[in-house]
Amino acid sequence: MILISFGTRPEYIKIKPLIEAFDGNIPYRLLFTGQHVDLLSEVNNDVLRLEIEEGENRLDSIVSSVMNNESIFDNIDSVLVQGDTTSVFAVALAAFHRKIKIIHLEAGLRTWDKNHPYPEEFNRSAVSRMADIHLCPTEKSAENLKGEKVNGTIHVVGNTVLDNLVHITPERTNTIVLTMHRRENHDLIPKWFAIFDKLAKENPEFNFVIPLHPNPNVQKHKDILKHVNVTDPIEYEQFINILSQSYMIITDSGGLQEESSFFRKKCIVCRTTTERPEGIGTFSFMTGIDELESLFYEVKKNPIPVGKCPYGDGKSADRIVNILKQELQL
Ligand code: UDP
């Protein structure tokens, strides 16, 4: 039995296609680690649930709440974790302590800067040291792991997030989608938001939309956005439809770079480091605060990317089922 663990909405979005492909094929149990509590309403399946006991340091609390939960591993031969959150690290560590096989989905992404993104770069690197089966989205991520001489097998499977998008036909409307939430950007949000607002004011022919992340460090700057359409976070199915109809995207998100590339939209990335170099210069464009305005006008003039989506073809889940059946002799 495989224990599939998730703790946040982006993790759930990326394991959802796998859960569907596992159904009737590979026995699994779901574990929700409780990192993003608002997520549970979206999850219908039978799920084991942990709760994060709050302490002084949130990251410590996540790790300590996951450890010492013997019963979650009852009858479990392998654990599947996705990505790089602190609960991914904690579940992998707990599995490692019990010599349970670890399958890492979206393995091999790297910035090689432990502070960007923080704490995710550490989490994913640490999981790579413990994992037995590394499911990499791209050749580049697989090369990273080979370079690190990790143990276990390495497979290039594409990014499962794209499996969610294959049924949608993209269009191009006047909507510009904005998102911002990364911890490294929290102190800079007033500056980013001021430019977002200026661009929205100067370009009234576009509908600038920002689903505002629930984090209070983001919410407290909401009033800066006078010319932007500020909404609550949008339910995933609706959000990907909006994305598929957008003109361009401005974000500090990781997953959005993959989704926007699949829909053939250009994406301005409000970050100075990236673990997704594959699309840089064609689909994604990194920016500091000072360059955002000029980059916006360049992308506005020329919004259609050239080339193939570098993050996969939307058929990852079936590939993974075949790999796991072989590797785990199921
Ligand atoms: N997303 C969503 N609703 C929103 C904003 C984002 O469903 O209002 C989805 C988006 O499509 C993507 C994921 O959430 O799949 C990205 O999450 P986030 O930017 O928080 O995390 P990251 O990808 O940086 O880990």
Image: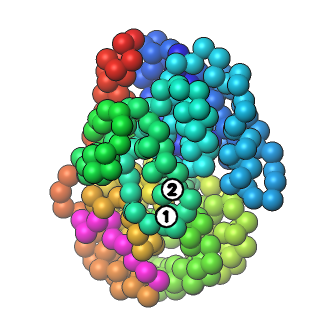
* Residue receiving disc 2: 122
Q: Is residue 38 above or below residue 70?
A: below
Q: Name the amino acid, label 1.
A: Lys
User: Is residue 27 shown left or right of residue 269?
Assistant: right
How packed is label 2: few (under 14 Cα within 10 Å), some, or many (20 or more)? many
How packed is label 1: few (under 14 Cα within 10 Å), some, or many (20 or more)? some
Residue 148 horizontal/vertical position (percent)? 33, 50
Q: Is residue 58 above or below residue 268?
A: above
Q: Is residue 288 magenta?
A: yes
Residue 247 horizontal/vertical position (percent)? 37, 65
Boundaries of the magenta span: 280-289
Q: Is residue 144 in view?
A: yes
Marking on residue 114: 1
Q: Are marks 1 and 2 in contact (CB under 8 Å)?
A: yes
Element under label 1?
loop
Along the line of sight, which residue is nearer the eye, 137 or 255? 137
User: Is residue 144 shown left or right of residue 229?
Assistant: left
Question: Which residue lies at the image location 56% right of the left edge and 59% below the top edge?
Answer: 119
Q: Is residue 317 magenta?
A: no
Q: Name the amino acid, label 2.
A: Phe
